[in-house]
Amino acid sequence: NYIGFDMGSLAIIGGALGVGIGFGLQNIFSNLISGIIILLEKTLKVGDFVDLQSGVVGRVAEINMRYTRITTNDAVDVIVPNSEFINGQVVNWTFGEQFRRIHVAFGVAYGANKEQVREAGLAAARDVSYTVEDERRGIEVWLVGFGDSSLNFELVGWVDLGGAGAPSKA
């Protein structure tokens, strides 16, 4: 006040600046806290194959305090904010259970012998090294529909973590 400067206006400017900085840092702090939660809960680890609600699909390559790096099947690295793992739905293909059931759609021309299609599908699945077939987990071929120019089938089988570790979205 002695030099003619009003301290009240400085307090208002400082308060507005503090609120602006607070809003600006909100996402950074959210991601930091989310990173701490991920690291402490251990629900996500390097090497897991994840499918995020945002559409990002790939293997966890790195977990940091603010972000997680996901490497897609196309070898593209995507930096994902950690808050997305806390606030969104995450499918972890390699968490917990040792086996996963997968569905592979395919079609054959009308008039094809359905029993031969079934046998060919079963033989193809058995030729894949990570296919699991035991008394609890079998391989099946389902007729699921009639397309414009094909009979639509689905090969349903179980794979171990080697097969579940890189499923395709195709």
Image: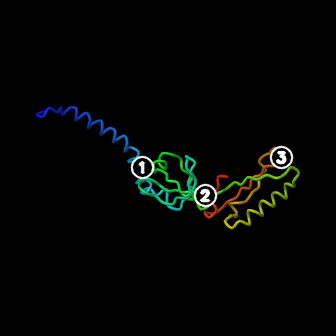
Mark-to-mark CA distance, 3 and 2: 31 Å
**Residue 149, disc:** 3
**At x 49% / y 48%, what residue is drawn?**
84
Residue flagged by tag 1: what amino acid is it? Answer: Asn
Residue beneath disc 2 = 74
Residue flagged by tag 3: what amino acid is it? Answer: Ser
158 relative position to 32: left or right:
right
**Residue 121, disc:** none
Mark-to-mark CA distance, 3 and 1: 50 Å
Quadrant of the rendering where the N terminus is positioned:
top left
**At x 82% / y 44%, what residue is drawn?**
148
Q: Which sits earlier in the primary sequence, circle 3 or circle 2? A: 2
27 relative position to 104: left or right:
left
Residue beneath disc 1 = 31
What is the secondary structure assignment of the residue under circle 2?
A: loop
Q: Are marks 3 and 2 in contact (CB under 8 Å)?
A: no
What is the secondary structure assignment of the residue under circle 1?
A: helix
Viewer-nearest of labels 3 and 2?
2
Viewer-nearest of labels 2 and 1?
2
27 relative position to 79: left or right:
left
Q: Which sits earlier in the primary sequence, circle 3 or circle 1? A: 1
